[in-house]
Every structure is written in structure tokens, then in C-alpha cells.
Amino acid sequence: MEIPARQSLPAMKQAPSHQGGQKGDPAFRLLVTATGVGVLVVLGAIIAVMVTGGWKAFATFGPGFLVSAVWNPVTQHFGAAAPVFGTVISSALALLVAVPLAFGTAFWLTALAPPAAASVIGMAVQLLAAVPSIIFGMWGFFVVVPVVAHYVQPAARQIFGHVPVLSALVAGAPFGTGLFTAALILAVMITPSITAVMRDVFLSMPAVLRESGYGLGATRWEVMRYVVLPWSRQGVVGGIVLGMGRAMGETMAVTFVIGDSNHIGWSLFAPANTIASLIALEFPESPAGSLKLASLMALGAILMAISFVTLWFSRWLLARGEQAAGR
Amino acid sequence: MKANNTLMRADRSASLLWRRHMCDKLATAMSWLGMLIVVFMLGSILWTLFKNGLAGMSVHLFTMSMAAPGQPGGLANAIMGSIIQTGLAILIGAPAGLMTGIYLAEYGTTSRMARIVRFVSDMLLSAPSILIGLFIYMMLVVPFGHFSGLSGAVALAILAMPIVVRTTEDMLRLVPVAMREAGIALGAPKWRVILFICVRAVRAGIMTGVLLAIARVAGETAPLLFTSLGNSEWSLDLGRPMASLPVAIYQYAGSAYQDWMQQAWTGALLVTLGVLIINIVVRVGTRGGRS
């Protein structure tokens, strides 16, 4: 073993000097660092453009912009309350549907499924996540809306129509479009991404913990409930919050089924608007420099603030979960 | 008395065991139900697309541009526009993402700066795409006074980049230290080691990221509404409004004309098939490579 090393010694002397070998290194380092910093510049520019673009609306309406539910292009009076309300309610409802679905699917994928089936169904879940949002919109409009209009809302009115508080939730003509339908579509859209996060955190748990649970005679559900869930709590919540962030910013799917009405009401089946759908629907009639466009930009700034805080929170939870896993 | 006690205890533990198993059965059933609902949704979407879209598949769809309702027309200009804008977006976004990924994996690693860049890139990955559209509208459409295919491509590039950043960084971290050391021992400068040894070793993985980025931006509609706007005529001019498949679908699906609706469905089928096939290829490919 000594001989080759000694043989290569003269060659090393002839090798290019250290300085020469590093040629081009500082330039490359500068290039990639500049690109990395460019990412920050892009985000900074997005924030700056949204805030300055919406400034005219904030200046005109003051803090009242946030609480006013009026959206009237004729009188040039705009308020953010109705679309913000629609965004929050539709996302919250979507989570109510999506979280149990995603949890059930992740439980099935990690604990119940035979390996071959798990990989096929896992693939199907990923494909559902990859379907473009406009396809969800079309599917929602032509498949889900009629079902809601003909079956779900009439049935809900039959059951809850005479209960004092619940009757307000199901009131209104059965258009089929509205908050409830939008929430259903959003739920289908975010379920795959929540499932993917849940599956990953469930699988990242050391197998020995799971096996100890089974060794003690626990059932599969008990292992999930008392071992896996407590262990992966933060990651699970992070995944749910990530799904919520997606739901709040979703545009095309919601635009098809939300019904386009800037009205705050009790009924879940009434047409409404979310921030994203309002921007998409009203943008064509908002010339550059108009107060309406400024109001849309201001809504964009609000959406940006909400979704960035949500995403930051979910990343923080997921990172903490990973840290806990690494200890 | 004592025997009776034991019997009762056995009875109680049997009922507890029964309850625990019922709980397990119930959870299992619910879990199956959840999984079946998710699969059913995918099936329903695909079935709807095939049922409504297949009828409109014809040569005209690929050879003729969009036309007024009642006139013979196709989606050729929209398909071409989508290809151009997606291609250009990847040409801009993929190198930028690759270099940012290299910065994060090789230079920044755990520095404060790198942590911020990584975090911001993750934010952009999940940021609402409509905001990117508004941003580019203010940056590239308002100053020039008109919508353009180029601005659409830039908006898509911003959406494509974070995906490439993520995969590039993850992949570069998998390169064994011995491989880098071999390069350094040969006297290669760091940039050559990174580009010609590390990146080359994981180029399949990086390609995966690029393909996923293509699949993501090819179906994006919201950012294009404000940037490339859509165009019913054949146009390859990046300085003018440009058609794209998703925007054409959006326009047609909201119309009341039978032939436009048909083309919207067929276009939707095309987009979905394209996106899903890329995804299947990527996932099957990476699974084979990993095991």
C-alpha cells in the first residue's frame, strides 16, 4: 500500500498550484449566491408591488377597507370583508372534510395496506394532487354543482329546515354554487397534499416504536392513536396548516363554483366569493390605474399576508417536527 | 366467592378486549372509506374528462386555431402557446432553480442567509399562483402597456423555480463525500467538482424536478389570466398576447356554445393527460431508481 503513494509523490509536485486549481471559483460562488439572493429579491418585490399597488385603496378607504362588506363598482366603493369572509369560511369547511379523509388515507397507506396496494394507491393520491386546478373547477361545475343543487341542499333543507339555528345555514335557492360546493372542491384538492405530509411523518417514526406497540398487544388503531399520532403531532398539524394555505390561495377551482356574490350571509349554500376568485373574476373589468384595480391589489396584499403567515406557521411546525424526529 | 370474582374479571377483560377490537374494526373501516373516497374522486375526474373529452379528439383540434362559435376551429394556437410559454418558463426557471439549489447545498448550507433563502423558496413553492400573476402584471404588463406571452412565461418561471431548487438541493445532498474528494484530489476547482461531478451524478434526480416543474406550470391558469391574457389567433410573437390551453379552457368552459364546450373538455383532457403522464413517468422512474 505504501508503494503507490510514494510513486505519486513526484506527480503531486508537478500538479498545478493550489491557486491555479481554484480558477473560476470565486466567480461561480458569486453567481450561485447572487441567484440565491435573487429569490429573496423576488419575494421582496412581490410584497412591495402588492402593497404599493393596493395603497390607493388603503388610502381611500382607510382601515374601513378591512371591515366594509360593500363591493360596488358603480359607486366606486370597495371593501374586503366579504371576500375575506368567503376565503376563511370556505377554507375552514374544506379542512373539516379534508382532514378526516387525509388522516384515514394516510392511516390506510401506512398501517393497513398491503405493500403493493400502498404503492399503487399512493401513486393515485399523488396524481390527484397533480391534476391542474382548472380541471377541478370544471369537474366541480359540471359534476358536483348539479349534485349539490338537486340532492344535497334539498336534503339538508328537509332535515334542518325547521331547526331554529341550522335552518339559516341551509337557506336560499338551490343554485348548487356557493361556499359549501367550493369547500367540497377545495377539500378534494388539498386532501392529497395533507395525506402526503401525514404519510411521510408517520413513516419517519422509527419502526421500533411501532413494533413495541404491537408487541404489547395493541391493535393497529391503538398504535396509531397512542404511539404514532402523539409522536408525529407537529408534523400532522404542519401538514394541515399547509393544506389550509393551499385552500385559501386556490383560484381557478373556486372561481367556477363559488357563485360570484359579494355578500356575507349565514347560508352555506348561498353564492359568495373568495379573495382569489374575486380577483380572477373582476380583473378583466379593472383598467390599470383604477380604484377597483387598486382594491383588487389590496385584496391580493391581504391574501398574501394571510397565506404567508399560514405557510410560515406550517413550515415552522414541520421543521420542529423534524427536529423532534432527529433527536 | 373467589371463583366468582375471577369469572367477573375475566368477563370484564373479555368485554374490554371486545371493545378494543370493535374500535380497531371501526377505525379500519373508516380508513378504508377515506381511501376509497379519495380514489373515487380521482376516478370521477378522469371518467368525466374521458366521457366528455374523447368525442372532440380530431385532427382539426391540433391543426386549426380557435374560432368563433359555429365556425370550424381547434386549439392549435393554444397548444402551441402553452408549449412556448411552458418551455420558456423552464428555460428561465430551471437554471435559476439549479443555481439556487447549488448555493443552498454547496455554499450556503446552514448559514443564516441560506436558511432564509431556503425558507423563502419554500414560501414561493406554496404561494398562491394568482399573486404571482398580479405581481408580473404590475411589473411587465403595466409598464409596457400590453399583455404579452413573455410576461406569462416569466410568471410561470417564478412558479417553476422553487420546485427545481428543492429537488436540486435534496439531490446534491445525496452525493457521497468520497466522490467530491476524488474530484478535489484530482486538482479540480470546486465549481468543476460541483458541476461536472456532483450535478452530473444526480442529473436524473434533477431532471425529475424539472419534469415536475413542467407538469406544475403547464396546467396553471390563474397567473396567465393577467399576463399572457389569451389570444384567439395563431401568434408566436412573445411581445403580444398569447393563447394557452388552460386559459382557452377557462374561456370556453364558461361559454354557452356547444362546440366551445366540447373543445374545452377535449382541451381539459389533453392537459390532464399530459400532466398525469409526466407525473407517472417521474414517479415510476424514481421508484425504480431508489429500490
Image (cartoon, rainbow, N blue to C red):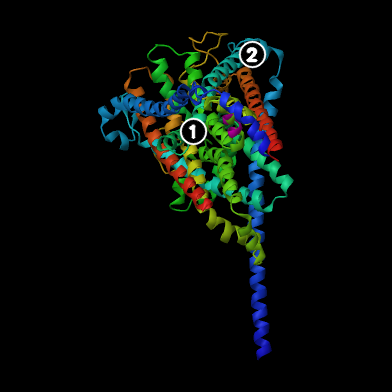
Mark 2 vs 1, N-terminal side: 2
Q: In which chain is the residue bearing label 2?
A: B
Q: Nearer the viewer, mark 2 or mark 1?
A: 1
- Residue A170 shows up from this direction: no
Density class for disc 1 (Cα within 10 Å; few <14, some 14-19, many ≥20) is many
Quarter of the image that includes the N terminus of chain B: bottom right
Q: Position of residue A279 (x, y in %)?
A: 42, 27
Which residue is denoted by mark 2 in the rendering?
A: B74
Residue beneath label 1, please?
A: B104
Disc 2/disc 1 C-alpha distance (Å): 45 Å
State whether residue A106 appears in this view. Answer: yes
Label 1 chain ID: B
Q: In this view of the protein, which residue sits in the foreground, A24 or A190?
A: A24
Dominant secondary structure (helix, strand or loop) of the stretch shown in magenta: helix
Q: Is residue B21 magenta?
A: no
Residue B102: x percent and y percent? 52, 29
Mark 2 is on which residue type? Gly
At x 50% / y 26%, what residue is drawn?
A18
Q: Secondary structure at mark 2?
A: loop
Viewer-closest of B80 and B267: B80
Mark identifier at residue B196: none
- Residue at horizontal 52 percent and vertical 20 percent from the top: B92
Query: Which residues are the magenta region?
Result: B180-184
Residue B132 in picture, x, y percent from top left: 45, 26
Front position in the image: B44 or A52: A52
How many numbered dots are placed on residues in this image? 2
Using the rendered image, report if marks 2 and 1 lie on a common chain.
Answer: yes
